Image (tube, rainbow, N blue to C red):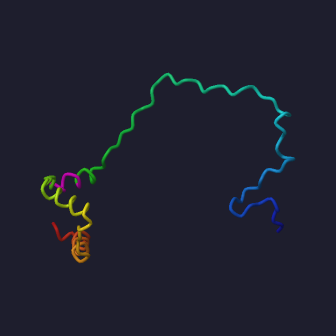
């Protein structure tokens, strides 16, 4: 099997050779016409949650925000002193995966 010499390993499609590309002066075409304007506006994007996702959203239930805790964590992050033990992260991750919280 012969491999054409005009193949690029990064782009396996053959490159156009000068013989294959017509000269710009050989083909005079009319100026490009603008696309016709659409009469109806495009539909708005929307998303629908599945029943399972809606149930998970409602099951979280804990939506209370504690501003003093948020401020303390932001200050520790800004100072570079915020630290979470890896064992705590691992424990919560395992608990969540095993559904021990329920």
Q: Quadrant of residue 87?
A: bottom left
Q: Is residue 23 left or right of 68 when viewed as pictured?
A: right
Where does residue 25 sit, x and y in percent of width and height?
84, 33
Which residue is depicted at the point 85% across and 48% down?
A: 18
- Front residue of 63/99: it is 63
Residue 59 falls within the magenta-colored stretch: yes
Kindly give the residue lying farthest to the top in the view shown.
Answer: 39
Which residue is depicted at the point 52% across and 25% down?
A: 38
Figure disc tally: 0
Above or below: residue 54 compared with residue 82: above
Kindly give the residue lying farthest to the bottom in the view shown.
Answer: 87
Q: Main secondary structure of the magenta part?
A: helix
Q: Quadrant of the N terminus?
A: bottom right
Which residue is depicted at the point 60% across and 27% down?
A: 35
Q: Quadrant of the C terminus?
A: bottom left
- Front residue of 29/78: it is 78
Above or below: residue 62 compared with residue 25: below
Kindly give the residue lying farthest to the front in the view shown.
Answer: 79
Where does residue 81 sit, x and y in percent of width and height?
23, 68
In the image, the segment drawn in magenta is 56-61
Q: Is residue 33 left or right of 100 when viewed as pictured?
A: right
Which residue is depicted at the point 19% across and 52% down?
A: 58
Q: Quadrant of residue 4?
A: bottom right
Above or below: residue 96 compared with residue 48: below
Where does residue 40 sit, x and y in percent of width and height?
47, 24
Q: Is residue 33 left or right of 16 when viewed as pictured?
A: left
Where does residue 32 sit, x and y in percent of width and height?
69, 28
Residue 62 falls within the magenta-colored stretch: no
């Amino acid at each position: 099997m012969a491999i054409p010499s005009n193949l690029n390993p990064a782009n396996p499609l053959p490159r156009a050779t000068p013989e294959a590309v017509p000269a710009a002066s050989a083909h005079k075409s009319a100026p490009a016409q603008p696309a016709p304007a659409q009469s109806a506006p495009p539909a708005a994007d929307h998303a629908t949650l599945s029943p399972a996702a809606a149930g998970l959203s409602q099951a979280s239930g804990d939506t209370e925000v504690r501003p003093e805790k948020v401020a303390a964590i932001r200050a520790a992050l800004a100072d570079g002193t915020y630290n979470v033990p890896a064992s705590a992260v691992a424990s919560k991750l395992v608990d969540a995966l095993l559904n021990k919280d329920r």
